[in-house]
């Protein structure tokens, strides 16, 4: 009897985790960068883009997208959080490139509620290895960020601020951790009942 109850709890935990894994096509990738340069000396960027300041961008990406013939994953970016402010696309204006000489994550900043005037964000990664799918392209961009062969550009209309990317990595989803916790909790309840 006890082993049957334990088996059921373990099966439930495995099922919950497997269900989440089956839906793991949407991932959040976090970019951290340090602003370092503005092009026009008369341009005064917002404080967050001043040289030396850290910029954090979370890209929510559907990594099940297939590229088109031009090596573009159009519409793969579902939302962008820029320094904690989330923006969603008005017309799918977010895409990832997988070209011979350039891999990039490009996104328009679709609804800047703080009126910070950022209208385009471009993470450029040079000398990429050819990749056959979006997830491998993202991993390659991450490797280039780590290797120092990537650059972040923030466009404010006709003005730009550049930043040095310091890390790009997938963020563990809270739902995975939560479901794992539910499974462990179920197993612990069964264990208490056994005692």
Image (spheres, grey):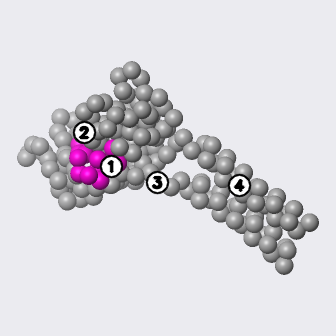
Mark 4 to mark 1 CA distance (whole Å): 32 Å
Mark 1 to mark 2 CA distance (whole Å): 11 Å
Q: Is residue 151 above or below residue 180?
A: above
In the picture, the disc for residue 14 is 4
Q: Which residue is mark 1?
A: 143
Q: How many marks?
A: 4
- Of pointers 4 and 1, the one earlier in the residue sequence: 4
Residue lying farthest to the left in this orientation: 41
- Of pointers 2 and 4, the one earlier in the residue sequence: 4
Disc 3 to disc 2: CB gap under 8 Å: no
Q: Which residue is mark 3?
A: 171
Residue lying farthest to the top in this orientation: 69
Residue ID at (41%, 23%): 68
Residue ID at (38%, 39%): 137
Q: Secondary structure at mark 1?
A: helix
- Asked if one can make out residue 37 in the rendered structure from this viewpoint, the answer is yes
Mark 2 to mark 4 CA distance (whole Å): 41 Å
Q: Is residue 35 above or below residue 104?
A: below
Q: Which portion, as a residue range, is magenta?
A: 141-154
- Of pointers 4 and 3, the one earlier in the residue sequence: 4
Frontmost of labels 3 and 2 is 2
Q: Which residue is mark 2?
A: 127
**Residue 195 falls in image quadrant:** bottom right
Mark 3 to mark 1 CA distance (whole Å): 16 Å
Q: Quadrant of the N terminus?
A: bottom right
Which x, y percent locates residue 78?
A: 46, 38
- Of pointers 3 and 1, the one earlier in the residue sequence: 1
Disc 4 to disc 1: CB gap under 8 Å: no
Which x, y percent locates residue 84?
A: 40, 53
Dot 4 alpha-carbon crowd within 10 angstroms: few under 14, some 14 to 19, many 20 or more: some
Q: Secondary structure at mark 3?
A: strand
- Of pointers 3 and 2, the one earlier in the residue sequence: 2
């Amino acid at each position: 009897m006890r082993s049957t109850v334990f088996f059921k709890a373990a099966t439930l935990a495995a099922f919950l985790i497997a269900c989440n894994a089956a839906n793991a096509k949407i991932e959040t990738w976090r970019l951290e960068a340090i602003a370092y340069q503005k092009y026009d000396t008369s341009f005064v960027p917002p404080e967050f883009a001043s040289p030396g300041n850290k910029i954090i961008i979370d890209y929510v990406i559907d990594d099940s997208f297939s590229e088109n013939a031009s090596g573009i994953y159009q519409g793969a970016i579902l939302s962008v959080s820029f320094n904690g402010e989330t923006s969603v696309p008005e017309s799918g204006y977010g895409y990832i490139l997988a070209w011979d000489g350039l891999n990039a994550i490009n996104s328009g900043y679709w609804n800047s509620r703080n009126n910070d005037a950022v209208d385009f964000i471009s993470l450029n990664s040079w000398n990429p290895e050819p990749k056959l799918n979006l997830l491998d392209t993202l991993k390659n961009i991450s490797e280039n960020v780590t290797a120092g062969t990537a650059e972040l550009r923030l466009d404010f209309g006709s003005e730009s601020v550049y930043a040095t990317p310091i890390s790009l990595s997938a963020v563990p989803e809270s739902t995975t951790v939560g479901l794992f916790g539910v499974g462990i909790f179920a197993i612990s309840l069964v264990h208490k009942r056994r005692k």
